Amino acid sequence: MRLTLRTLLAYLDDILDATDAHELERKIEESEFASGLVHRIRSVTRKLRLGAPKLAGKGMGLDANTVAEYLDNTLPQDQVPDFEKICLESDVQLAEVASCHQILALVLGEPADVDPALRTRMRSLLKAAEHASPEALEEAARRGSAFLAGPPHPSPEHDYEDEQTVPAIAVAASAVPVRHDRVAQRLWPLVATLVAAFALALGVLLVLGPLDARHPVLGRFLPAAPTQVATAPGAGTASSSPAAAGSSAAADGAAAPARAATGSQTAGLAPPPTSPPSDPAVPAAAAAPAPSADDTAPVVPALPPVEAAPAMAAEAPGKTPADVTALTDPRLSRAKLPPAPDEAASAETPEPLATYTSDQHVLARLDAATGTWLRAVAHEPLAPDQRLVALPTYRPQILFSSGVQVVVIGPAELELLEADSDGVPGVKLHAGRLLAMSTGKPRLQLRLQFGARAAAASFDDLDSTLALEVRSYLPPGADPESQPASLVAELFSAAGRVSWTEQYAATPLALEPGQIATLVDAATAVLQPLDPLPDWLSTRNEPLIHQTASRALEPLLDPARPLLTALQDQVGNRQVEVRSLAVRSLLLFDEFEPFVTALNSRESRYYWKDLVESARAGMARSPASAAKLRAACERLRGEAAAELYRLLWGLSPEQLIDGGAEQLVTCLNSSSTDLRVLAYLNLFQITGKTNNYQPDLEPRMQRRSIATWERDLRQGQIRYKSPPVALPGTENTPREGSEKAATADSP
């Protein structure tokens, strides 16, 4: 099979048979360009803000028909090289082709899920059409859309042999236009709804206040209402001008009949004269006759004249009385004004530091208020300085508002750091692995902290991807409660060029693909060649049984429940792979009792190695975690706890010579399964051999294998195949996950 872009996409989407896939995998491993292209395809399809070609694009690379013909293998062969060249030169085109191929592989690879009720409905329509009479079809054409509802929904057991109802499919085939009266019948509910909404809104506005300038909502759009000043009989008006007094009296005389007609008793003034006074100098109130004894309306003394407008005009020079408002005169009451908006509520919600974007992975967050671990929900904003834990086998993704995307590869523990004055966010990685990449923006940066180190990573290319692994290292045989672990970090560029600038460093460290930098505690970074790339970069290298377990466990972890409670419930799951994954996850939170129990379970024999490695990582996390593991052994194993805890440390070359090798061989004959498991795993780690020993079987059934180990002990062959170094990175030692098992003689 030829190695082309189309066959490479078929390999990535897992639609090739086993033989072709194996052959193509070998060719990809042999070709440096093909390996880089695989990582580039996976990178561009993950970028959230990468553009897409227009639907009506022109040209070979932008035309959707050309992409479809290429994926369907119908594009002329002379155009295929040019099209593939365009895809290799443009991330947008490459992402478009790869994404379309992946979607087609998913759609065509799985049968469509049709609702049984819908299938029964369609069959009923077809059967009814066979028995429809011409008169019924003609009636359907005349009535138009009245028959579009079709026959009633039948049950699956309904018999349609004698069905005479006109089917909806026959009416649709007649193509009868919709009548105007039917359109009107469909529109009147909308019109009625709009009218009711308008009436409701008008009623609410009337309740809030009069429809003038005093209205709290519409006041700014309406003119001010005329002010009427009521005066008592015989009292002078606010104006000293006789003409003004006469006009005021005329206004009162015109308004009084209306008040009297409606029975209003609010003014408390005498009835107005039937004609205006002849002398304009006499106020209207003085010329009015006194109220008679028959009047039933009470006489209310009039308010004194109001002279607010002249006072405001005097105190606000350069402004007319109409210009003075409650905002310019502090003496006026603000009780009737609309409340000032809450500045905190009206302010725009600040953009979160980062967002959790995965929905099928598991990321735990610590609720600081309750001290409870909860599962993060997809699209949930993440706060700075919040402890986050990615469970084993899961790869949750975090998108920073700056445009940097981080893929956390579990097991891992980290915290997000607030953006600095330049807007650069940060990540504090306590332990685990992550991939940090740009989402299509140039020159993005990310601050990284681990241990006492602080640095900034700059993504020089649009496809730059930084891989970082941080772990605590204890040499074999070291007491985890008394000897502090060393913090080891390894970083390299998985794609593109990355600049690594440590705090107080004079010059940045340029990371090119094919190089790896190792940092131990506060020592200077050591740059070494990287070949091949670690297996943990790709999910395809994850064992299939682990992928199955992660897919089964994920829906069982309800975000509404405490995460540790949900994981404890799955320790008894009937699927051993789910049970083992739950135990490994609990080890991240210093829950060691399920691990001690699993070492004695024969059903967990295929997961003992993973469980022991996770427990040793927990011991190296801190002396407090190691003390919790020792306490769990003492609670569950009694007298055997000390020996069990000691075997978890491992053995150094000196300890092997001082009797450690003999102790391991002796434990192979133990009646306790957990002691046999730890002794066997230590022997395999030291020598690389198994001698066909199976720790889950009773010693009496493995006398030949035990005899072989005893012979190796006598001959002095129980020694390290590759002596462990004091600290990793000082020698070119193989890294964890960088190689597959070379032989079948593995546990």
Image (cartoon, rainbow, N blue to C red):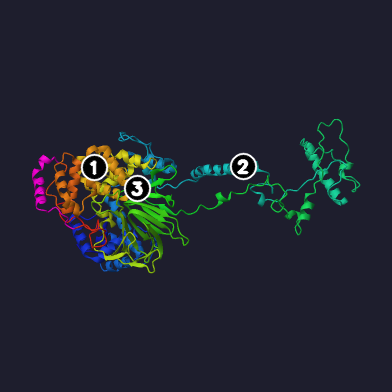
User: Which sits in the foreground, 315 or 33?
Assistant: 315
Q: Amino acid at mark 1?
A: Ala
Label 3 to label 1, Cα distance in Å? 35 Å
- Among the 4 quarters of the image, the one containing residue 294: top right
Q: Amino acid at mark 2?
A: Val
- Among the 4 quarters of the image, the one containing residue 742: bottom left
Q: Position of residue 532 (x, y in %)?
A: 24, 62
Whether 733 is among the magenta residues is: no
Q: Secondary structure at mark 1?
A: helix
Residue at x 32% of width, y 46% of height:
625
Q: Which mark sits nearer the N-terminus, 3 or 1?
A: 3
| 277 left or right, relative to 472 | right
Q: Position of residue 449 (x, y in %)?
A: 38, 58
Q: Secondary structure at mark 3?
A: loop
Q: Amino acid at mark 3?
A: Val
Label 2 to label 1, Cα distance in Å? 78 Å
Q: Secondary structure at mark 2?
A: helix
Q: Which mark sits nearer the N-terminus, 2 or 1?
A: 2
Q: Which mark is residue 204?
A: 2
Q: Which residue corresponds to mark 1?
A: 642
Q: Which residues are magenta?
A: 697-722
Q: Position of residue 486 (x, y in %)?
A: 31, 56
Say which of marks 2 and 3 sits in front.
Answer: 3
Crowding at label 2, few (<14), some or many (≥20) Cα neighbours within 10 Å?
A: few
Residue at x 33% of width, y 46% of height:
624
| 413 left or right, relative to 540 | right
User: Which sits in the foreground, 582 or 647?
Assistant: 647
Q: Which residue corresponds to mark 3?
A: 362
